[in-house]
Image (tube, grey):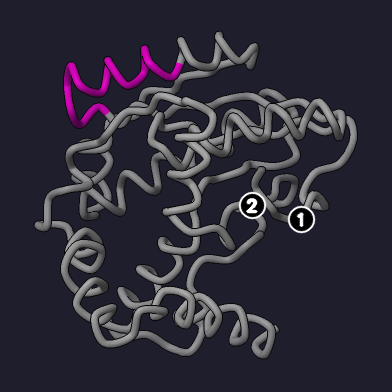
Amino acid sequence: MLAFSETFFKRGEIVIVGFSGGPDSVCLLHFLRHLSQKKHFEIIALHVNHGLRGVAATADERFCKKLAKELGIDFISVKKSVRTLAKKLDLSIEHAARKARYEAFAEVAQKTGAAKVALGHHLDDQAETVLLNLLRGTRAEGLCGIPVRRALNAKVEIVRPLLCITRAEVEEYIKENNLSFVTDQTNQEDIYTRNWVRHELLPMIEKKQPKIRQHLSGMAAQLTEKLK
């Protein structure tokens, strides 16, 4: 069983779960299904198809729809043209994809009356983000990394219940519960700086400091408290 604060969610509210079909979002959706039954809130699985990977993206969407149905969870899919958005706003594909996802979260929250959007970022993501911000050059706020919770807009809050949990713990949960997931091959391509940090830089630092991920995550949490 995963261990995190249950105070993220209130009885009777609607929670959108960002559901890509990857291991992190599968873990989050599966666990929130259990927690929603205990805490009496409603969850909706939201899949955003970025229109970037052709038949692979379509297959991911089908997988998500099938798994949500098996879990008895309402499923919504939104299609966004990330390349069009990137060109229109002069953004990188990564930044345009993020913008498209958050637009979809806000749109679906407004339609459904959802109070929260739950995302599957974990401790390793936090460590990567802090390092990435440091490499790009950042103010102190950038070293706070990914916030555990923040406002999406005036009515909706983004929460990240898995931020204190490592990728290894997510993988263990997936294995223990015999859950399937999809793999986005772009996560393996080091042309993206985040992937380079994940696959090259962090493992190299880890040889000297095995707990670097925990240290970076802990520093981010401490800075967040000090800068409040």
Prevalent SS, magenta region: helix
In the foreground, 132 or 154: 132
Q: Amino acid at mark 2?
A: Pro
The mark tally for this picture is 2
The residue shown at (37%, 23%) is: 79
Location of mark 1 (residue): 5
Residue at image position (42%, 63%) is: 124
Q: What type is the residue that disc 1 sits on?
A: Ser
Q: Residue 59 magenta-drawn?
A: yes
Q: Distance between the Cα atoms at labels 2 and 1?
A: 7 Å
| Left or right, 150 with reference to 95 | right
Looking at the image, residue 77 lies above or below residue 120: above
Q: Say whether disc 2 or disc 1 marks the residue closer to the N-terminus.
A: 1
Query: What residue is pinned by disc 2?
Result: 161
Q: Is residue 21 visible?
A: yes
Regarding mark 1 in the picture, which secondary structure is present there?
loop
